[in-house]
Image (cartoon, rainbow, N blue to C red):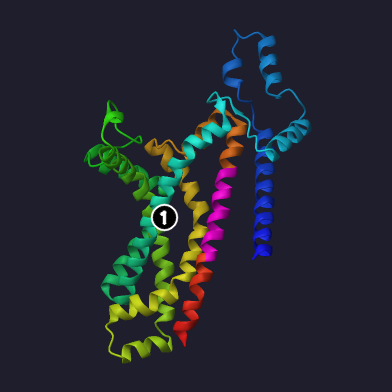
Amino acid sequence: MARRLLRRFLHTAVICAVVATSVFVLMQFAPGDPFATALDGPDVPPSVRAEWRARYGLDLPPTERFVRWGIALARGQLGYAASRRQPVVDVVADALPRTLLLVGTALLLGFAAGVWIALLQTRHHRRWQDRVLGACTLVGVAVPEFLLALVAMTWLGARWHIFPVAGIGSLGDAAGWPLWERMIDLAWHLALPAGVLALAVASRVARHQRAALLGVMREDFIRTARAKGLGEWDVLRRHALPNAIGPVIALLGLALPSLVGGAVLVERIFGWPGMGQTLFDALLARDYPLVVAAVLVATLLAVVARTVTDAIANAVAPRRATGAM
């Protein structure tokens, strides 16, 4: 167990080092720097530009900057976000919980909905219900998240006024509301961005779960359960689903990077102040330390999610073996 954890830790460290180095190198080829917009005006003296670039090490050769940056990163120092005028750690600590709330809600809702859709499709295999739900999940997989977000914002927000179109909470004196009102207000603002991401997750989960269920339904223990007089829903829920859900759980770990990538544009569209919005603004401002930190956080989330889902899938695997006997 200790050896496995050590391998996981080393694997995570290597991935983060490769990703961080790649992002740093790519940033060196990007034009400008964090102060290009503010300091390249005709009224700014050259001495002021040189002073600011020297203060943040932007006048050093790329190799020396990379060495200094690597040493600081190894010490846990992520640098200073010039575009936010805050340390990068403070910016990440402020934005990360909101992204975790958004992505976590989308994963839970999408996984539950996807499994339920797959159960319905399997129960009505090759009937019109299966075909209609299959077409819907295919659309959910094919249409990009940002397009779904624009449609949802236009119709459910701007036109029908069912949900707010932007932000994380109501303006005005919302800070003085009771806790339960603030929770309802947060859920109201969370509904559209989380619903868009959950729809994409549910579509992928449903298609994989349906295939896994159909494979299990041909096993001998399913015929035995039917011979005992169990109804079709009981056979699906109590016997087929526990033995077919392991690969789908592992799929969530692989789907998280694409979900986080989709969250960047979804957060931007809905004005959700999370890591996606932070990364988008940092790219526009050429805030290299903040860009590297945001990519590193996304990488860590993907690796941790893959580790957790693999562990859960391995825990489910013995149930499959037991059920198949």
Q: Nearer the viewer, residue 309 or 48?
A: 309
Q: Secondary structure at mark 1?
A: helix
Q: Residue at x 41, y 43 (%)?
A: 266
Q: As drawn, is 183 to the left or to the right of 101?
A: left
Label 1 neighbourhood size at 10 Å, few (<14), some (14-19), many (20+)?
Answer: many
Residue 139 position, x and y percent, is 37, 58
Q: Is residue 175 above or below residue 305?
A: above
Residue at the spot 48% in from the left edge and 72% down from the top edge? 316
Depth check: give the residue in front, 168 or 206: 168
Q: Which residues are magenta?
A: 296-311
Q: Residue at x 26, y 32 (%)?
A: 177
Residue 195 or 100: which is nearer the viewer? 100
Residue 181 image offset from top left, x and y in percent: 25, 38
Q: Is residue 144 visible?
A: no
Q: Quadrant of residue 30?
A: top right
Image location of residue 225, percent across then percent down: 35, 87
Q: Is residue 101 left or right of residue 28?
A: left
Q: Is residue 155 magenta?
A: no
Tag 1: amino acid? Leu
Residue bearing mark 1? 107
By secondary structure, the bulk of the magenta-drawn segment is best described as helix
User: Residue 178 location, x and y as percent?
Assistant: 26, 35
Instruction: Tally the numbered discs.
Output: 1
The answer to whether any part of residue 139 appears in the image is: yes
Give the position of the N terminus as an image quadrant.
bottom right
